[in-house]
Image (tube, coloured by chain):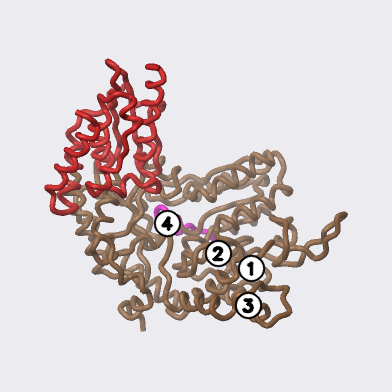
Chain colours: A brown, B red
Amino acid sequence: MFNVDTIRKDFPILFRKVNGKPLVYFDNAATSQTPQQVIDVIVDYYSNYNANIHRGVHTLSQEATDLYEASRQKIQAHFNAKFPHEIIFTSGTTHGINLVANGFSSLLKKGDEIIVSALEHHSNIVPWQMLCERTGATLKVIPMNEDGELIMSEFDKLVSQNTKLVFVNHISNALGTINPIEYIIEKAHNVGAAVLIDGAQSAPHIKPNVQALDVDFYVTSAHKICGPTGVGMLYGKEAWLKKLPPYQGGGEMIAEVTFEKTTYADLPHKFEAGTPNICGGIAFGAAINYMNNIGFDNIANYENELLEYGTKKLLEIEGLKIYGTSKHKTSVISFNLEGIHPYDVGTILDKLGIAVRTGHHCAQPIMDFYKIPGTVRASFAFYNTKAEIDALVEGVRKAKMMLS
Amino acid sequence: MSIEDIQNEIIDEFSMFEDWEERYQYMIDLGKELPLIDDEYKTDNNIIKGCQSKVWVHAEMNDNKIEFTADSDAIITKGIIAILIRTFSNQHPKDIIDADTDFIDKIGLKEHLSPTRANGLVSMVKQLKMYAIAYQTQLN
């Protein structure tokens, strides 16, 4: 039974005060909060298991390795990857994207085309621009409409025999739009192109099944789903991961080293050079357990309720415009008050203890599309409440009064 | 009036306010009222890009004193600009170089001049000082 009051007790930070007011945390799309269950795992690791992994014969090292590899298997099971070695631990989504982009440097040539979407985060634009500069490939962009949805008929026109890669986020961080990735993957595969899905925003809301999706690469970060920062994962189909060259050289990723030649380790270690974020990797698995115990269906249902309630209440404020009005979206409300800069609204809300994001959300092309400097973005998680939304609405009204 | 006197005057004004709301309302009003930069100077050359809000700064030297004008697209940023301009404008370059901005702390607006705030204000203060250094070099 889903009970938000019980769930909130798992998150110590939700009980602190900010500027003398109870914290209302609505910046979940930037980072989620960490439950005590995950904090305990972090403390337990450093209190009982801290050691370097994969190469020690001593007990601590063995135990830490077991925990780390068990976590990889939890992640594998969660995303339904075929093999544990298809899960590569990374420092986060951006790292995963760069790893793949770098790998494709040697596989692309002039005349090849890469397709991205107009809804991308800068981290899913810049690495591909860099890749195009290195290889002579061309970047094509799927345009968006007023509702913040990708225009699929335009995507159909962009896909051709020259298309080698397609990169789309599962869910837009700035607007919350859920993109039709099933359709995109199928179309791309019809011309033999590989697809990478940026799941940074989807992982906290949807349980993706990478085998059913038939996606080639899927990346996400632990800190978006109640885990710690500095760790994430790249899922890649075994065949692709074998094909891509290693990203970074160092310890862990080798089989044999002489000054003449080095042979690389098998998957996943080929892509995991150096000592990894061991504690982070273990806590990532604990976060996934935590989320699954609550249940992704419960999470989605409750967050939809919050989205509907928040949308309705905010739209009652005169002069408030919501950006991103797709029917398929997650619990993100990006908005502006007419004639008022989002930075000003965010500053007043902060004084009231309400944490929202303001600015261009690392998605300047979207802001250019709407011809605005940025938005105020409130993003809800399963531990937020309608009472907190009421506080937000009251705060926005106050900001409007002070700033108009 | 010296920069220090003006800063003390501002501290006095702000000491009358009882809570953040009054302080911010005053700052917002300052931002609205002050005649700021001429549109002709609102160019890309004069822009300081913060992640969150933009700031434009223009400087002119008259009678060995620098006159600053500035603007922002966000009103709270603009209010702080109004306060900074009030202290730094029409002052000798040397006095501007030597002045600090600790008074912002004393009027309860410290967070706006934090280097991590990304509103362009820290860069703006640096820019004011750079102008002062440049004009001081001319005077020497």
- Whichever of labels 1 and 4 marks the residue nearer the N terminus, that label is 1
Residue at point 69% right, 53% down? A103
For label 4, count other residues whose C-alpha is less than 10 Å away and answer few (under 14), some (14-19) or many (20+): many
- The region drawn magenta spans A172-183
In this view of the protein, which residue sits in the foreground, A189 or A261? Answer: A261
- What's the CA distance linking mark 2 and mark 3? 16 Å
Q: Are marks 2 and 3 on the same chain?
A: yes
Q: Viewed as shown, does residue A279 lie left or right of B132?
A: right
Q: Which residue is mark 3?
A: A64
Q: Which residue is mark 4?
A: A177
Tell me whether the residue at label 1 lies in contact with that at label 4, contact meaning CB atoms closer than 8 angstroms: no
- Using the image, name the chain to which the residue with label 4 belongs: A
Q: Which residue is mark 2?
A: A231
Look at label 4 and name its amino acid.
Thr
Residue A182 highlighted magenta (yes or no): yes
- Whichever of labels 2 and 3 marks the residue nearer the N terminus, that label is 3
Q: Is residue B32 above or below residue A361?
A: above
- What's the CA distance linking mark 4 and mark 3? 39 Å
Residue at point 59% right, 56% down? A95
Q: Which residue is mark 1?
A: A87
Q: Are marks 1 and 3 on the same chain?
A: yes
In this view of the protein, which residue sits in the foreground, A67 or A137? Answer: A67
- Using the image, name the chain to which the residue with label 3 belongs: A
